[in-house]
Amino acid sequence: MYSIKQVAEMLDIPSVTLRAWETRYQAVTPERTESGYRLYSQENIDDLRWLKEQTETHGMSISQAVRMLKESKRKSLEDKVTAASGTPGDAFDKMKEQIYSALHEFQGERANGLIDFGFSLYGYEAMFHQVLVPILVKVGDAWEEGTATVAQEHYMTHMISNRFYQFFHVFPVYAHLPKVLAFCPEGEHHQVGLLLFSLFLRKSGVEVIYLGANTPEEGVMAMLDKQSRIGAVCISLTDKELLPYSEDLLARLKQKAPGIKLIAGGKAYEADPPQPSVADEVLGGSTERWQSWFEQTFAKFGNKR
């Protein structure tokens, strides 16, 4: 990753021109540090070098060059996916490999282009369940095995999680339905299942207050004090060693807010035979099970859409 000063020197393009190409024409989309500084990938640099050649050597306007570049990238993505689509499963596998490879190499723009194309081709549900969730699982496994660095794991998880969060704002909220508070207990860092369940609830019109992974207990209690109309609290747990703490936490939540429904899920709760829980409902990972639970639980609020 390179700073804007390094890129300007490398390509002999003034920094002010780089900023203008980005803001006016969306020529490239560099990453940003927490402080807001631009970081350019090698792919960004290659694209900028190509754009400079078109404008200086071939006399093309920057707007025309950017359109050509984006069209070329779009066709390239289509060709790759088409070449891989012998069967739907093959196409999903190929897309997973391409997105994972792009993220592993910190090529965020290329990864987002692939994801956008996948959404247009397969729809959001298929992309989440067949492509993005398996990538998140693979990222976690790679980190645990030592084949992905902490920086790579954080970057890849952040990029894909952001695509989940974007859809939280797409679906309408039905005001007559109670809110749901969703989080992973402190110490639990895997939130894939929680993201999917929260997205399912949002699609069904429920406003979800999503706190995410590794949420301290005091934050949850404070949220219950501040927020009205929370009808359910949902926790997700993967680490079985955290089960005792999770059950104690559920008991404290029930004592604090006895009228709120408690929902638990995740691999830690998928023992066979099922272990008793303080939760009012233990849900598996099946969307059919989620739908059945939702219809039974929220039926009393009526259909006021």
Image (tube, helix red, strand yellow):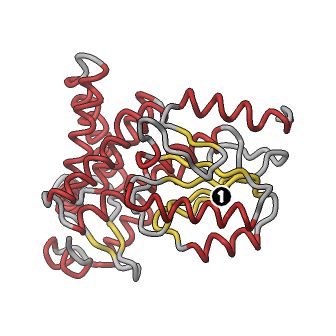
Taking the spot 38% from the left edge, 65% from the top edge, the residue there is 22
Name the image quarter holding residue 282.
top right
Q: Position of residue 25 (x, y in %)?
A: 41, 58
Question: Quadrant where the N terminus lies?
Answer: bottom left
Q: Position of residue 38 (x, y in %)?
A: 33, 74
Amino acid type of the residue that numbered disc 1 sits on in the rendered structure: Leu
19 is higher (above) or lower (below) than 152: below
State the residue in front, 124 or 70: 124
Name the image quarter holding residue 44.
bottom left
Is 203 positioned to the left or the right of 69 in the image?
A: right
Callout 1: few (<14), some (14-19), or many (20+) C-alpha neighbours within 10 Å?
many
Is 225 positioned to the left or the right of 245 in the image?
A: right
Taking the spot 74% from the left edge, 47% from the top edge, the residue there is 173
Taking the spot 49% from the left edge, 44% from the top edge, the residue there is 275
Is 292 positioned to the left or the right of 4 in the image?
A: right
Q: Secondary structure at mark 1?
A: strand
Question: Residue beneath label 1, please?
Answer: 181
Taking the spot 56% from the left edge, 26% from the top edge, the residue there is 288
Is 300 positioned to the left or the right of 77 in the image?
A: right
296 is higher (above) or lower (below) than 189: above
